[in-house]
Amino acid sequence: MKKKSVALFVSTALLVLPFVVVADYYPDAKPLQVFIDVTLGVVAGLFAAFAVVMFFVAGILFLSARGEPEKIKQARAALFWGIIGVVVGLLARGVVPEFLRLLGV
C-alpha cells in the first residue's frame, strides 16, 4: 500500500509541477490560458512519445516478420498508428490555439 501511495504522490506532483512553473513565467496571463497552454504542451509531448514508441515497435515488427504476411500487416498497422499519433499531435498544437483565438480567450 505504501508503494502505491508514494507512486500516486510522485505522479501527481509531476503532473502539477508544470502548472506551478508556468504560472511563474506568465504572471499577467489568465489562468485558463495558462492551463490550456500547459495542457497542450503535455499532450503534444505524450503524442510525440507515443509516435516514437510506435515507430520503434513497427521497426521491430518489420524486422521480425521474416516475410510472413500477417506479421507484416501487424507492423504496417503499428506504423500507421504512429503516423496518426504525429498528425493528431500536430493538429492539437495548431487547431486548439486557433479555436481559442476565435473565441477570444
Image (tube, helix red, strand yellow):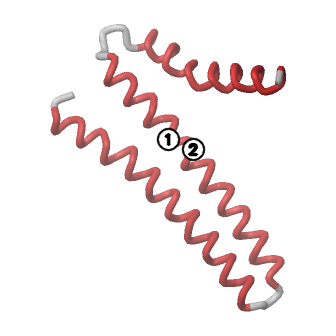
Q: Which mark is residue 26?
A: none
Mark 2 burial class by Cα count in 10 Å: few <14, some 14-19, many 20+: some
Would you say the residues marked 1 and 2 are in contact, meaning their CB atoms lie under 8 Å apart?
A: yes
In the image, 72 versus 9, the foreground residue is 9
In the image, 6 versus 28, the foreground residue is 6
Check disc 2 and give the amino acid type.
Leu
Q: Residue at x 39, y 25 (%)?
A: 35
Check disc 1 and give the amino acid type.
Val
Give the percent coordinates (x, y) of residue 69.
72, 91
- The image quadrant where one finds the C terminus is top left
**In what element is the residue under mark 1?**
helix
**Spatial CA span between label 1 and label 2:** 5 Å
Give the percent coordinates (x, y) of residue 23.
43, 13
**In what element is the residue under mark 2?**
helix
Give the percent coordinates (x, y) of residue 16.
55, 20
Question: In the drawing, does residue 69 fall left or right of residue 46?
Answer: right
* Number of disc labels: 2
Residue placed furthest toward the front: 1
Figure check: 65 above or below 47:
below
Give the percent coordinates (x, y) of residue 92.
39, 47
Q: Residue at x 30, y 9 (%)?
A: 28
Question: In the drawing, does residue 86 fall left or right of residue 67?
Answer: left
Q: Residue at x 68, y 56 (%)?
A: 53
Figure check: 1 above or below 52:
above
From the image, tell me which residue sits under label 2.
46
Mark 1 burial class by Cα count in 10 Å: few <14, some 14-19, many 20+: some
From the image, tell me which residue sits under label 1.
43
- The image quadrant where one finds the N terminus is top right
Residue 3 lies in quadrant? top right
